Amino acid sequence: MSAPTVSPASDYLVAVEQELSDLPAEDRSALMEDLALHLEALASEDDDRPLAVRLGTPAVYAADLRAAAGLPARAAGGPPARSRLDAVLASAAYRRALPVLQGTGRLLVELRPAWWVVRGYLVVLVPCLLGSDRLEDIPVPAPMHSHLLGVLLVLAAIAGSVILGRRTLPKALRVVVVSAGVLLVIVATGAALDVRDGIRFGLAADAWAVGPQVPDETYPLLSRYGPVTDVFPYSADGTPLEGVLLYDQDGRPLHVGKQEWWKDECLRTLKQPQAADGVPVPNSFPQQYELYPGDLNLYTATAMGAGSCIEHRERPDVPLPTFAAESVAPAPGD
Amino acid sequence: MDASQLLKGVLDVAVLAVVRDSDGYGYDVVRRLRTAGLEDVGDASVYGTLRRLYSAGALTSYVVPSDEGPHRKYYAINDRGRSVLEDSTKTWRTFADTVDRLLDGPVAA
């Protein structure tokens, strides 16, 4: 046997192998093992022409080979995904990251039971969150307004989810289950954001609401700022008026609520003027309050220190308009 | 008519027929096919066909060391290959007869 020399077939062989690089390794190696012998036998034939002339280009040769051997044709355009993946898997960066990736992978596998439990909970919670009365469903879902039913359903769903998780499913079914899980998480996230906005809105509404939202016995007159407890009338020239009788659009006496809160925290009582027949007149404004005898604290009903209660009640500062003579402007909205 | 398209359909039976007569290595099979008249047959097609028939169990192979050149891998037909060839031969004859009759003229009713 002659000493091995650089075979004229080897360059051609390498080029053909490159064209077959997308094939599974076992298919490729089975083809290549024989092809080396075949091409060397061919090269040793009594023919001076190069192999590329006798056999065609390596790409054409490889394409014919695939077709005849019953292997799939090479995918058009760019290196196939498989070889790109191989390149990534062979890269130094990947090898360095491999322990971390493997650790993360193991951790994810260990955490799968936790996901099964969460999945069972979400399966019950999410449909409840999509209905009304969502705040009632957190943390325990209340389908049909029953927390007991919710607990039972959650337990059943968790059991089912864990059984499903422990089972080895066919690939098609596994794809369905994973897709459903992803969808569940997306919908749950959306619903959770919705609920959060709802809570935030509710808190904001509570913060703004001072006192009752509808007129009642205690506060019969409400403005947008809350209950009205007094009215301070002025004449057009800015003179504060006392003892003004006010009536509504239907001629009914205007009633306001009793003022419960005072800046000096002293207890006061309402003293309404009385008509000749002894009946109190509630619609005389401003309302008359008097300090409770003994200067008691509003909240504790204990005696306040001397001089801490303001005897004479000041009117609040109001920005009074100045009227031009004979001018009457239309109100906004007229 | 492009004979290479026809060739693809009958390459299996042609290769089996060549190695039925005597065992052959790749290029030897190509040469014998060309000598027999299939001049358009490509090396890669023959080699691929040999590999596929071998994978399908219709051929066996053995390596013959050579003092003068590279080793040669010979392919030999086996019982399975012979039975495949037999079936393929029948199919081919029926097909060829049908096409012959079509080409020769109107079929007598």
Image (tube, rainbow, N blue to C red):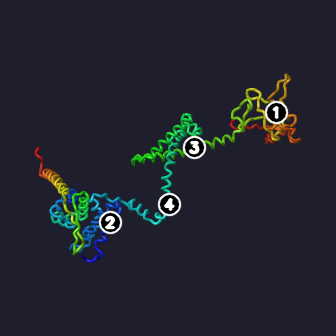
Query: Would residue B100 be found to the left or right of residue A263 on screen?
Result: left
Q: Where A310 falls versus B24 (above or below)? A: above
1 and 4 marks in contact (CB < 8 Å) = no
Mark 3 or mark 1, which is nearer the start of the sequence? 3
Along the viewing direction, whichever of B57 and B3 lies nearer the viewer? B57
Task: Identify the residue position indicated by label 2 in the image.
Answer: A17
Furthest toward the top, the residue is A277
The residue at the point 30 percent across, 67 percent down is A58
Mark 2 or mark 1, which is nearer the start of the sequence? 2
To which chain does the residue with label 4 belong? A
Q: Amino acid at mark 3?
A: Asp
Q: Where A127 falls versus A112 (above or below)? A: above
Q: Nearer the viewer, mark 3 or mark 4?
A: 4
The residue at the point 31 percent across, 66 percent down is A16
Query: Would residue A19 be found to the left or right of residue A224 on screen?
Result: left
Query: Would residue A142 be found to the left or right of residue B37 on screen?
Result: right
What is the C-alpha distance between the residues marked 1 and 3? Answer: 47 Å
To which chain does the residue with label 3 belong? A
The x, y position of residue B32, in whole percent, is 17, 65
Task: Identify the residue position indicated by label 3 in the image.
Answer: A194
Q: Where B75 falls versus A217 (above or below)? A: below
Mark 4 or mark 2, which is nearer the start of the sequence? 2
Task: Identify the residue position indicated by label 4 in the image.
Answer: A100
- Which quarter shows the C terminus of chain A? top right
**Residue at mark 3 shares a chain with residue at mark 4:** yes
Furthest toward the right, the residue is A306
Q: Nearer the viewer, mark 1 or mark 3?
A: 3
